[in-house]
Image (tube, rainbow, N blue to C red):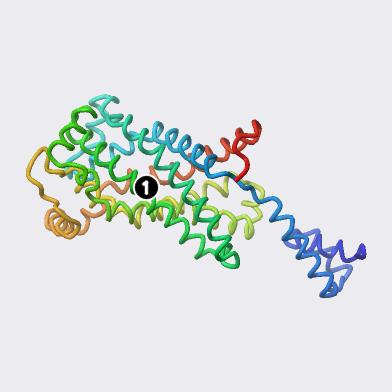
Amino acid sequence: MRLQDLLWALFQKTKHDSKARYWLASNRMPTPMPSVAADIKRRENAVVEEAEPEYSLSRLFCIGGLAGTFETLIQQPLVYWKTMSQVNPNFSIGAAVKAGFRPLFRGVGVNAGSIGPISAVQLAAHGGLEIGAKQVAPEHIDKPIFQLALASLSGIASCVVVTPAEVLMVTQQTTGRQFAGVFKDIMAKGGISTLFRGNAPTAFREAAWTCGFFGITPILKKALQDDSKFCRRNDVAATVISCVISGQFAATVSQPADVIASLMKADNGVYGVKKYTGVLETCGALYKESGAGGFFRGLSARSWRCVGAVFIMGEAQTALHSWFDSFGLMNKR
């Protein structure tokens, strides 16, 4: 390959820079021969493929669990604010703060103990789905719509853990009782089926969340860095912008489903007559009580939580991967 062709390839990559544009214009360098251009493209693709990390599912499971637990311990007050706003239209976060910080962390044990496994399952499921997709349809794996679909499916798969954990947490938050008493009453009066109340809206909500976290965030960040010199030079800024947009998207799109799920989980029949017996019945009762606005109760708290979760968990996972790499832990699939 001629030196001229190498220089052309280099400055084509940086042609948005003023010095590069001046050099290209002043030298009027011709486009390299097709065979040379194809060789350059193959070399670029080879570098990308070699740089792509390959992690074991056990490593993804561990890192997802640790990151999820860390995020929950930080943001539990937002979870409490969101849940209580949804199940109690008269709830005031100001009054709750004046009552002390202890109620704000009510249910943090069961929530952290559930979000950890939930995040572990979601990250491992996403990794497993990507492995399977690369074997079945490798030509589609890099398409954005395919990435979004894989991300959404990982959220749906996690509901086997999400729904039971949230039924217990919400019941704790709305009754003020301890975990052992709540679990005993639910199992005695409602059985296993009670632990899966609101599973359908929960699945939709989790699909929206993982679509934003695993799908939209990396796609948007890459687009920002490709098109913006500022974002290309400021990785943190690109991360924050993509987290805000994807987190707000996930929160807004899935908020009605989250409200419905919270109401169904809080009204499990253990502490009173069931009012929200199904998804349609819950929608009808909520609309009658609060109108269309009722479906967006707690959106402010949940928006903050989703944006924060995308950023905190993303950065935590990056830091944990770096730590695992330094000790050579679970590197191979």
Which sits in the foreground, 332 or 205?
A: 332
Report the residue at 21% width, 43% height from top. Answer: 192
Residue 251 at what x, y percent from top left? 36, 51
Quadrant in the rendering for residue 254: bottom left
Could you tell me which residue is drawn at 49 percent across and 49 percent down? 243
Q: How many marks?
A: 1
Please name the amino acid that badge 1 sits on. Ser
Outermost right residue? 2
Q: Position of residue 49 (x, y in %)?
A: 69, 56
The residue pinned by badge 1 equals 303
Q: Residues within 10 Å of mark 1 (few under 14, many from 20)?
A: many
Query: Is residue 207 positioned above or below 193 on the image?
Result: below
Quadrant of residue 271 in the image? top left
Q: Is residue 184 visible?
A: yes
Taking depth in this image into account, of 249 and 145 the one nearest to the observer is 145
> In which quadrant of the rendered view does residue 142 lie?
bottom right
Vertical comparison of 289 with 176: above or below? below
Q: Mark 1 falls on what kind of element?
A: helix
**Quick one: 117 or 258, which is closer to the camera?**
117
Q: Nearer the viewer, residue 196 or 235?
A: 196
Is residue 220 in sight in this rendering? no
Left or right: 69 in relation to 285: right
Q: Is residue 7 left or right of residue 83?
A: right
Tell me where residue 301 appears, x and y as whole percent: 33, 43
**Residue at image location 15% in from the left, 42% down from the top:** 190
Q: Position of residue 44 (x, y in %)?
A: 75, 60
